[in-house]
Amino acid sequence: MIYTVTFNPSLDYYVQVNNFKSGVVNRAVSERLVVGGKGINVSLALRELGEKTLALGFVAGFTGKAIKQEMIDLGLENSFIEVDGKSRINVKIKGNTETDINGTGAHVTAINFNALIRKLKSILKEGDWLVISGSVPSSLDEQTYANLIKRIKTVQGVNVVVDACGKLLTETLKFHPFLIKPNLYELCEIFSLNEIPKIEGIFACAYKLQQMGARNVIISMGSEGAAMVTETSQSLFVRAARGQLVNSVGAGDSMIAGFIHEYLKSGNYFSALNYATAAGSACAFTQNLATREQIEYIESLML
């Protein structure tokens, strides 16, 4: 079973504004409202690939009810905990450039966090996967993911995947997650780099993250592809397929889903990285999360 945890889910309001100008009234030419949150996106992508998944996390208020209803409508199994406040609404302005305005999220307390831990410990079994990704509400700190992994370590043999920024990610490394997936900008933030390094520097940073405790490290590189260092001492690189960027939201989440799906099938790191890169690219080339057919078509272009 593959479980995902989203601490800070959202309703994402996409609005297309041609020739957007600040300080004046702009008229939208199109709009749509979708459920958001990195863990939820991973679960949706996994379900599309035929994997059994359960989405967990926290929701609050009328926006939280709308998030849960949307997941039900999409056929996604979920077990979210209701908390105080309101789940966030993120505004995604699409024009000549992309502008995102992300809300702060619900109020998650220590009591709520403990409830999630109890739920996870009651359902996790050896061989399961647990994907922890995205941001946390302002009521929680940078130790949140590390504390979660520490608390569930009594369940042996769970493959933990972490996709987060800064200390929220690096604080988990001492607990040896199976996989982490920073992107290039997150990599620069972690190592205080002023510019994106060349491929040799990317691999050097990936090895440092491995030395800090991660078992496997994928560095997602956008249109350039992905680099990976594995616990079997492999250094892998996959070049992404070329295409027109439509929407970058969810591409990294699709990469994680694609990697897990293919790794479960083949047990081969290169095959899994290749499929993950195809899944990320296919998502970037579409308005929504990609279908399995779209992913496999993009993968065929990469062979």
Image (spheres, grey):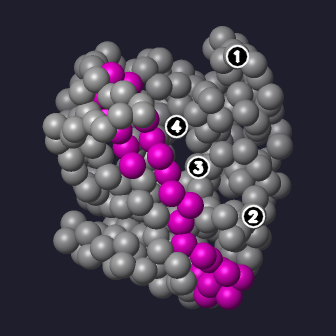
Calculate the distance from the C-alpha at mark 2 to the C-alpha at mark 3.
16 Å
Please report whichever mark, 1 or 4, sits nearer to the chain's N-terminal start.
Answer: 1
The numbered mark at residue 163 is 3
Calculate the distance from the C-alpha at mark 2 to the C-alpha at mark 4.
33 Å
Mark 3 closeness class: few <14, some 14–19, many ≥20 residues within 10 Å: many
Q: Is residue 226 above or below residue 26?
A: above
Tell me which segment is drawn in magenta.
91-116
Q: Nearer the viewer, mark 2 or mark 4?
A: 2
The numbered mark at residue 141 is 2
Left or right: where does residue 111 sit relative to residue 300?
A: right
Three-letter amino acid code of the residue under disc 2: Asp
Q: In the depicted view, which residue is nearer to us: 233 or 200?
A: 200
The numbered mark at residue 204 is none
**Residue 70: in magenta span:** no
Q: In the depicted view, which residue is nearer to us: 148 or 259?
A: 148
Circle 1 residue: 195
Q: In the depicted view, which residue is nearer to us: 206 or 140?
A: 140
Q: Position of residue 128 (x, y in %)?
A: 52, 68
Calculate the distance from the C-alpha at mark 3 to the C-alpha at mark 4.
18 Å
Please report whichever mark, 2 or 1, sits nearer to the chain's N-terminal start.
Answer: 2
Query: What element does badge 4 sit on?
Result: helix
Circle 4 residue: 269
Left or right: where does residue 171 sit relative to residue 293?
A: right
Please report whichever mark, 3 or 1, sits nearer to the chain's N-terminal start.
Answer: 3
Three-letter amino acid code of the residue under disc 1: Glu
Query: From where the camera sits, is residue 81 visible?
Result: no
Q: Nearer the viewer, mark 3 or mark 1?
A: 1
